[in-house]
Amino acid sequence: MSRILLFFLLFAAFVFADKSTANSAPFIPKAYLFPADYQTIIDSMVPGSQFGLSIRSLRSGKQIAAIRADSFFTPASTLKTVTTAAALDFLPLHYQAKTSMQLAGSISGKTFRGVIRLRGEGDPNISARFYTEPFFILHSLADSIRSKNIDTLIIRTELDSSYFSGPRKPKHWRSNYFLSWYGAEVTPLIFNDNCALIHLYPGEKEGDTAKVVVEPDVGYVRVNNSLITDKGNRRKWRYALDPDDPVITISGSIGKNVQNAAIVIPVRNPNFYFERAFLQALQDRGLVIVLDTLARSGLELHSISIKGTPLLSFLDEINQRSQNLHAEALFRIFAAAKYQVGNVENGIKGVQEFLRKWKLNPEDFVLFDGCGLSPKNKIKPSSETKLLATMARHPKGKYYINSFAGPGVGSGSKRMQTLEFAWRIRFKTGFINETHGLVGFMPTIDGDTLLIASFLNNTGKNPDNISRNALDSVWSCIYRAANNGYSSLLTMKDLFQQGGHITGLSNRIRFFSEKFLGKPYGMGGPTGEGYLDPTEPKRMINTDSLDCVTYLEHVLALAKSSSEDSLFSTLQKIRYINGQTAYSFRKHYFVADWLGEGKFAKQIFLPNDTSVIRTIPKKDFFKSKKIDYQELDPKLYLRYLPLDKAIEFADSPWQGESTVRGIGFISSRNTLDTFHTGFLILDKGKKPVLRDASYKFKKVLDHELLEYLNSWLGTGKCPGIILFEFL
């Protein structure tokens, strides 16, 4: 049966109006993947910027939408997806960075005299980020000394920072980055993210010097305080960091009513910050410390190595919260584990080897660091989606994907919050200096996953929040197109669970068909090919409204599916020849295609039936959709029960066992087979009941077959009926 087509437009998360005229129509992106619409969004929101986009199907591996996908873009923090992929590929999941302590000297009574050596392997999680307080690991080291019945230490300390080589301040970073927490120096001995929190408190009255408190205060960061208490809620302070020493100078004013004011600063030479924190931890445990620069080493009397948090905790901090220090530490850890020297050069070398191993082109990934802060980093969107596809299929792929942020999670905590079912998306964010990126994984309603890489460069004076919202708008449009009807899929899954106890195909059809009673009729075919085919990009599944054929199809999918996870694929196999979701493969003619395939139903030939031969005009049908149909128009030998005989059948109580059959109503048009269909509810001793999605009544309902057939008497529009059984 031919279906009337009704174009359905998808309303995107953001609607953009042409600013040139007050009465211009709103811009509504198309319901399928259409790159020109995404460029329009960017041009409307971030004019003058450079936009790159690649959308790749995980199922096929093919890039299905692109905008400057083979051009280089600065990726910002989305570069972390490369670092974490290479590290996860090489390092075992149980990898843990070690922090070691060695006591070499002599013991007299309860006094140790000698050298304490501290060695770090880049554990970035010695902080309150993973433990109850930042000193947890350092207190554990101190406790191990106390366990040796030592209460006094006459010592000098030696720091072994050889696990990482190269400058603490990465090359190619802009100098202003080192003034902020996200530009913390990179060392193998890391404490408290190599940062300190500076609390600012107003004095008691105007003109008083404000109070400045360092947390944690281990006596390392020094403060030059010229901050003056002012009136009200003024926040007019300034601060400057010494480029080489752990000194902060604070000036300006703070209102006496100000509360909870604080600054996070990176510390200089964090190896020594770690050392001072270690000495503080010893004192916290009651050990008496006497520093002696002339203390001599001796026999190794005690050593301990404490393993830090596992590799996956690194990935979560890097990809969900975009921690640069964690990324740079992992970059060097990966390099040291692979080449015995942990530096940027070996990190880059290791990434290139990883890319070649997985048949990715290293020339498409230009790295100068591991976190993405360098403006010299460059990536092609098309190559980024190839990387994401590789990691989705990787043996450790699920850990990689789950480490990403998403709407409401990590760096995505305030992104796409109004997008329905957005929790399914996983992405990595990126932002620095006129550069934005958003890359990740987007599941689709049909069971595929889209790999998406989107970049905005040279955003200029456009506000950063607008640039971020522009990328979110593009992603929202893609998501709504690729998941149009997802709520209906959830409805189907819920119905499937309700019918789990029902056995037998006929019983299941009866049960599920009844569940749709009262559902609105959807004029013109409420279901299409979604984002997969622009010919009719309506929902691929729709329980909100149904026409006569889609009603049969949805019920049959529920009845025949073996699990809730197979509902969607079963529905597509019912709707399309060989299950190939495309308009040209849809079963448009009910008898010729839907029944003719013979996989889900077959016609029941009845006594007193008759037959006609009709030519189905598929060439003209597809031509109207600009689809080239190469085969000859098929001839259909149509057998049916004439209307008068059908009325006799409908007026007689059913004598067989109770069951459910299908029924089709023959069209009088020579170019069509049927014009309507439905379920036939047959209960022993009762007249047949038609259960259908009715155009006349605008809903799914039960009514007597006899009444329906009588309504066609004398019209000449319904020559008869066919019956069919479901397989």
Image (spheres, grey):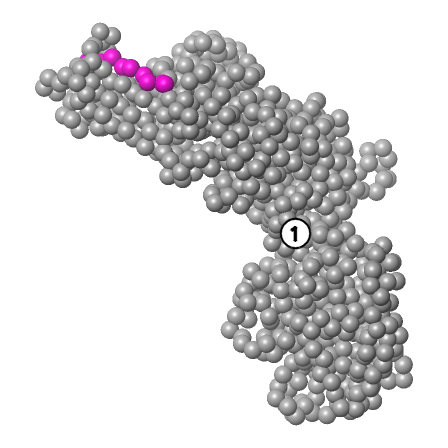
User: Does residue 12 appear left or right of residue 304 in this picture?
Assistant: right
Q: Quadrant of residue 309?
A: top left
Mark 1 is on which residue type?
A: Asn
Judging by the rendered image, the residue that carries numbered circle 1 is: 483
Residue at the extreme left: 109
Classify the position of the N terminus by image quarter.
bottom right
Q: Quadrant of the C terminus?
A: bottom right
Question: Residue 322, how many percent across, how many down?
Answer: 52, 31
x, y (%) of residue 286?
A: 21, 22
Q: Is residue 277 left or right of residue 171?
A: left
Looking at the picture, does residue 635 appear above or below residue 82? below
Residue at point 64% right, 48% down? Answer: 60
Label 1: few (<14), some or many (≥20) within 10 Å?
many
**Frontmost residue, 200 versus 223:** 223
The residue depicted at 51 percent of the width and 73 percent of the height is 501
Q: Can residue 130 be seen at all in this image of the molecule?
A: yes
Residue 699 seen from this side: no
The magenta span reads 153-162
* Percent x, y of residue 599: 66, 72
Asked if residue 160 is among those painted magenta in the image, a careful observer would answer yes
Left or right side of 151 for 688: right
* Magenta span main SS: strand
In magenta stretch: residue 139: no
